[in-house]
Structure formats: structure tokens, C-alpha cells
Image (cartoon, rainbow, N blue to C red):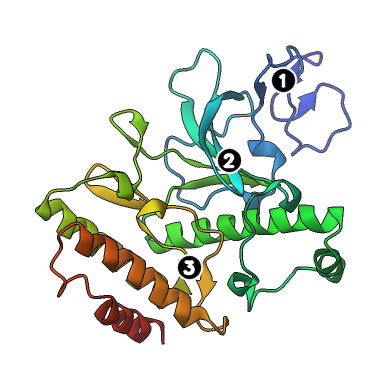
Amino acid sequence: MSSDTASPEFGPAGSDLDPFFVFDFRTADDPDEGQRWSTWLSVEPLSRGPEPRPDWVVTSQAALDTELGVLKTGKEADVFLLERAVPDDPDQSVVLAAKRYRDEQHRSFHRSTAYTEGRRTRNSRDARALAKKTAHGRAVAAGQWAWAEWEALTRFWSAGVPVPYPVQIDGTEILMELVTVDGEAAPRLAQTRPDPELLRSYFEQLREAMIILARHGVAHGDLSPYNVLAAGERLVIIDLPQAVDVVANPTGTDFLMRDCTNVCGWFRARGLDPAVADEHALFGELVASAF
């Protein structure tokens, strides 16, 4: 290599940069409106998805993030469609779901503090700000819910629970796998009318997922057909910021029972045998797995 060239590994020739510093050439052209450079390299390693990562995850520093519009609005967060792609490289392109939490001042829903019993705030300054509901405290609260969902997604995905693959977290934004059916965003389970065979399969999938969670001492805390996606013949569980530690949280078993009631009630209403969709039997099985 000549002395007046730049290396993508070691930075500009003659620089005093650390030899392991990755030089970024992306300053030549600013992104267009509605675009940004990929934030993959700007987040901490613990804020990136667990390994082994799926092949579709785009990690190139040359990638652009392009806003594609709103997928879903919610009471505490909105989900957007975001394409992460390397220009002119069709092999490095993926559309993700970008979930962005609002601060408490801009939410129309406030989760009960019962969900957070047994959790710890990471430092005393944040704890004081939360208690006083200052502007910093509101930002901390939004970040806490985002981080809680991120931790749940990474933990559950690694444990084999059917959840979207978590790509990264940056502040109050979580990028995750977009669950699709035939190229379209997958519908909520509540929107489906499965035939008897598929209905039974769906129930067994949820039952198995709930058992895995219970073995890790966790309940979803708000599980219902509105927090489950039907991706063809498989189910994917979403909306996880309120995941409850059934041991540390004094009302953990109450949340566990509520999950069982919501799930079994919906399946019975769709025609599943009540002897199969029995919330008390399911609850007993989960408690035995948790304790």
C-alpha cells in the first residue's frame, strides 16, 4: 500500500489513530431526508443482538437507515418500518421494526408499578429523578421500559422462546426483526380465525413458550392474543417490557395466572376443548416449572 492512501482498517495514512480504530468514510455525502447512517457501530456491544446472529442482520458501516413509515401506533410506543441497507448491494438489505418509546409526558398509558416490583434502578440519581417525576426522571422511565424490553427479547430469544430477533437498542429505540407473512407484516393472533387443527397447534406453541418462560422464573405479564403475532403456522410473542419475575415480584403469580386466563379464554372462545384450554391446569404446570 502506498504511503498516501487510506486504509479502511487503520485510518488515513500518517494518522495517529489507534491501529484498531475503524475509519469511517461515510462523510462524503450526507444522507437524504428520512435517512441516517446505520447506528450499528455507535451502540455498545451489549446493545447489539445475541449471537449467533441471523444472516439477514446488516452490520456494514456503509449501510443507511431509511424511514418507510408507521407500522403501528400505541399508547406508550410507536412502531415504524425502517430499511437498513448498503446502497447498490441487494444482498445487504433488510426491513426492520423500529419500536420507539415515548417519555411519560407523551404517553396516554402508564403501566402499573406492580410490574416493576423486584427490579432495581441502576443508580441512585435515576431513582431520585423517577420518584420526583422530573424531566430527567421521565426520560429515565422511557429508557427503563425500552431497556426492560431489550433485556427480555435478548434473554428469551437465546432461551428459544419465539420472539422477534432483537437487532439493537439505542436509547429508547429498539430495532428488531419484522415478522411477516407473504411479505406483509404478520397479523395479531386476535385477528385470525384458525381452523381446529391450527388452533390446537397455536395453543401448544403458546403453552410451550410459557413453560420456557416459567423455567426462567418469568411471566410475560400481559400475554393475550393482542400480544402474539400469527406468522403463518407459527406464533411469535411480542410486547415484552413488563415481563415479570414471578419469584422476586410479590404479585408475580397473579400476573402468571392472568396470562393463563387471557390465553385459555381466547382459545376456548375460538372452539378449543375446555379440557385442553384450562387456565387452572396450565397455571399449575407453569408454577411447577417456575418453582
Decide: is 197 above or below 170.
below
Where does label 1 land, which residue? 26
- Circle nearer the N terminus (1, 2): 1
Where does label 3 land, which residue? 221
Under tag 3, what secondary structure? Answer: loop
Disc nearest the viewer among 1 and 2: 2
Q: How far apart are marks 1 and 2 (CA)?
A: 29 Å
Q: Which amino acid does label 2 sit on?
A: Asp
Under tag 2, what secondary structure? Answer: strand
Q: How far apart are marks 3 and 2 (CA)?
A: 20 Å
Please say if the residues under marks 3 and 2 sit with CB atoms less than 8 Å apart.
no
Decide: is 136 above or below 181.
below
Judge whether residue 144 can be spotted in this image: yes
Q: Quadrant of residue 213?
A: bottom left
Please tell me the numbered disc located at residue 78: 2
Q: Which of 146 and 266 is in front in this view?
A: 266
At which x and y percent is residue 44?
A: 69, 49
At which x and y percent is residue 56?
A: 43, 34
- Circle nearer the N terminus (3, 1): 1
Q: How far apart are marks 3 and 1 (CA)?
A: 43 Å
Identify the residue at horizontal 43%, vertical 22% (top origin).
Answer: 91
Identify the residue at horizontal 35%, vertical 55% (top origin).
Answer: 225
Disc nearest the viewer among 3 and 1: 3
Please say if the residues under marks 1 and 2 sit with CB atoms less than 8 Å apart.
no
Indicate left or right for 241 with 190 as reference. Answer: right
Identify the residue at horizontal 73%, vertical 58% (top origin).
Answer: 141
Q: Which amino acid does label 1 sit on?
A: Arg
Under tag 1, what secondary structure? Answer: loop
